[in-house]
Amino acid sequence: MNSQKFSNLPLTQEMLSNLDKIGYSTMTPIQADSLPLILDSKDVIAQAKTGSGKTAAFGIGILSRLNVKKFRVQSLLLCPTRELADQVAKELRQIAKFAHNIKILTLVGGASFGQQLGSLRHGAHIIVGTPGRVLKHLDKESLNLENLETLVLDEADRMLDMGFIEEIEKVIAYAPKERQTLLFSATYPDEIMSMSRKLQKDAVKVETISVESTNKIVERFYKVDGDKLQTLANIFSTFNPVNAIVFCNTKVETDAVAQKLQKMKIDAIALHGDMEQYDRNDVLVQFSNASARVLVATDVAARGLDIKELAMVVNYDLPHGEETYTHRIGRTGRAGAEGLAFTLFSSYEEEKIEEYRNETRIFESQESLKVQQNFDMKPKNITLVIEGGKKDKLRAGDLLGALTGDAGLKGSSIGKIDIYDRQAYVAIEREFIDEAQKKLSHGKIKKKKFSVWIL
């Protein structure tokens, strides 16, 4: 790990103080190598794996050069998924606390276009969005990029995988030719290098994969010709993970596997691209706040999920290649913890599985797994939903006060609190959920009554 300090960079004291306050004291390799170039207005094409600190690298760069008094869109960040866009915007807002009145707006599909129009009328300094929705606003002339200084393509390889290249090119046609362009990607296929040549000028390549600490992941493979779902349940009963993501290749199978696991008393929820945004929010909140132990997902969830401590990843379906496999299992084994990764395959997939064999991966019989009678996986928490949010000026402290005050809960029984524009989510220990819901429903928060229900 590179030991360079942020104080070695030409950053204001206000930004340095805020970085220290939010826990950014030492630069990661990708930050140490790319930030000096970004601050020097160079075009950068950077390769670093998920979880390496890429967001802070480009975030600190664009925020340090932002002119707050110039209330125009100065930076545009394109992301492949809604989840990643939300995560990036959230981290940028943390970094942006060094100054007042920096407006960061998220433009993603699945959210109300009308509400986004209203927000855009009030102006923004930084836009974080998915290519399709950003392009729609540009075409409708509700978004103007005339003052754009920096364009960031985050997880550019994933955007290519998802077929966004045409939309990205149309978005860039609205941007000034004289600008800084930053490409961040976990992998560098030929298409990425071709994109760089088209979009960037004298781009400096930064690659830190070799010096980043490797995730500690134990990888196990099981051949399954019988009941695949039972093998999955046996993995859970043998290792009993705190939480797990199970990857399927289709949306239909994602729903089916989650429903079948629920019938087996294994707490599971599904996430895929056909879900409405509010349903996706419900799922992501529950999984991140320990109100659901198993998330069954398509690859849309392979990136952009802000789950810092994930115990296990299971490839229920064989990934489409080693690259997808790497992205999937890279969600676990972070921050020095040991992660577990399991892959199930059938006899007709044995030829494909040969590319996965190496000296570190374990191929063993499913007979080695324990079959426990009456095994279940219940979540630690259950989520309480309050029909009020930022628009109602609700803060986490208001909810915490109402729950520990009138509702009489101990602070230790209250978990993560997420507040959106019109809804708030609070994780409550399972045994206290009914009591919390009842007391909040009959009480008031900030002298006002809100609808409250259990998710």
Image (tube, grey):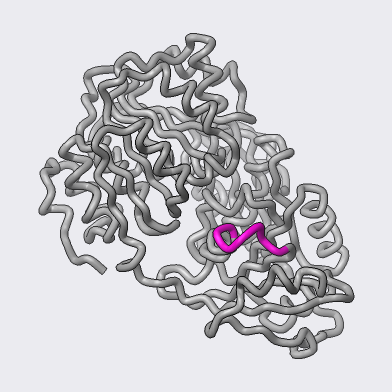
Q: Position of residue 58 (x, y in %)?
A: 31, 43
Identity of the residue furthest to the bottom in this view: 368
Residue ID at (24%, 45%): 204
Frontmost residue, 265 versus 130? 130
Would residue 36 be seen by someone viewing this image from the given angle?
yes
Residue ID at (43%, 51%): 188
Identity of the residue furthest to the top in this view: 141
Q: Position of residue 407 (x, y in %)?
A: 61, 52
Q: Position of residue 20 (x, y in %)?
A: 22, 54
Residue ID at (79%, 58%): 258
Answer above or below: position of 212 versus 164: below
Relative to residue 183, is residue 142 drawn left or right? right
Chain part drawn in magenta:
318-324
Answer above or below: position of 28 versus 424: below
Relative to residue 136, is residue 254 drawn left or right? right
Answer above or below: position of 340 versus 170: below
